[in-house]
Amino acid sequence: MSRDLSSVKALTFDVFGTVVDWRTSIINELKQLGESKGINAFWESFTDKWRGGYAPAMDQVRQGEIPWKSIDELHRMVLDQLVDEFQINDLTESELAHLNKAWHRLAPWPDSVEGLTRLKKKYTLVTLSNGNVSLLTNMAKHTGLPWDVILSSELARHYKPDKEVYITAASLLDLQSEEIMMVAAHRYDLDAAAELGFRTAYLSRPLEFGPNGETDEAPDMPYDIIAHDMNDLADKLNS
Amino acid sequence: MSRDLSSVKALTFDVFGTVVDWRTSIINELKQLGESKGINAFWESFTDKWRGGYAPAMDQVRQGEIPWKSIDELHRMVLDQLVDEFQINDLTESELAHLNKAWHRLAPWPDSVEGLTRLKKKYTLVTLSNGNVSLLTNMAKHTGLPWDVILSSELARHYKPDKEVYITAASLLDLQSEEIMMVAAHRYDLDAAAELGFRTAYLSRPLEFGPNGETDEAPDMPYDIIAHDMNDLADKLNS
């Protein structure tokens, strides 16, 4: 907690869970679609399984079992399995394609835009997400997230926590690792960034996985900052 | 001129010359540096040669004569030759490095921010420049250019007008070529984009190369829109 942070020029943000509340957003889209189509299902469970299928799908890419696919493509692979599993048969291809892009329309946590707007005065704000560039661009446009530059795993063709993602980001930003602070609600992401010399900030998002979900928080986490929301991060960075 | 433009969702912008006035900005930085260091030189000529050295340097990369180098690196190669040629010997390494980044601090043409702000309501605004990502990011932060996403030749590791640059942009935006309009003050850039099916807008910048400079304008140009500045482009796109 005592490292000098005065060298930090850019903040790289994990997005799903850290900046946006994917779970509530996806449940809401599914419920609306269900109502309009007369489909009943346990949408919370559908949502958790949709998100739950994403890490194994990424791991298939990371381990070279399947060739590079974007998150849009991985979300669609999992969605196709889930509509089978939930026996949802009456969605057209265009409805499925639109539903898959619900991940482009995720809403920010209530403090995100305000906190980022404060941080933007002092730092270059960068996405560093496994989401593809078009997803992150559409999301920012839809919600007003004030990024300076959108970087993505897609640009490295590796998924976090592969080191190539962080190295590619530092290279594109033309910054040394100690000039970058990774901000995430997930330890694996911060641990990978710290390994390469990035500064790190853990952002608590206790509701990411719902009211009964488990978070990644642990005692004595070795990060430079532990913040309870985006405004708290801005406070702790004096911005 | 009569093609349907209703499919266009994103505008990709050339930046040097089209959005920012590199010549006036660089001349001003050089004059200030010259005054503070007591160096006299023909700074207009220095500037024109600096810019003039950039296309041949890029062509060396494009033709594989030298490995990939960013525009920052190419600018520095040319700068080092020019300080020799102009016999400027009293700049330190840190002053040269700062001067080289004058290209990160270029000022927009007077209509650029206003016109882009209007266009942003209707379109996704994208840089598609030979400038590297950090240069474009710093420039936007410095001047308030309201980009939605920063794309660059650097992401394709090819320079415009190589087709890989435009193809990479369409892929990252997840758009078909007819959903993208390339905006530039240079015909070679629009011709390359049009070849791949992009829509095209020529933006006149008669002063890009100074009061006595030649522009790229020609009679009967085959582009979808010919605009005399960024606000005129917004008018012509009804935004």
Image (cartoon, coloured by chain):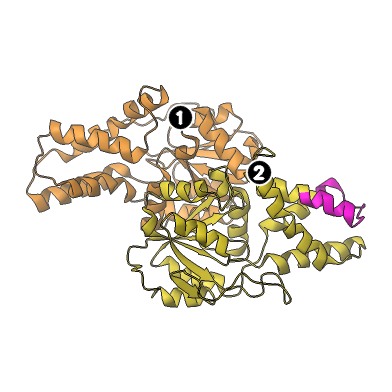
Chain colours: A yellow, B orange
The residue to which callout 1 is attached is: B187
Q: Position of residue A157 (x, y in %)?
A: 57, 42
- Residue B30 shown left or right of residue A163 in the figure: left
Q: Quadrant of residue B11?
A: top right
Picture residue at 46% right of the left edge, 69% below the top = A223
Asked whether B196 or A54 is in front, the reply is A54
Distance, label 1 to label 2, CA atoms, is: 41 Å
The residue to which callout 2 is attached is: A61
Describe the element under mark 2 as helix, strand or loop: helix
What stretch of residues is rendered in magenta?
A78-95
Picture residue at 62% right of the left edge, 35% below the top = B177
Q: Amino acid at mark 2?
A: Val
Quadrant of the frame with the N terminus of chain B = top right
Q: Position of residue B2 (x, y in %)?
A: 63, 33
Question: Which residue is at the far left?
Answer: B38
Q: How many marks?
A: 2
Q: Amino acid at mark 1?
A: Arg
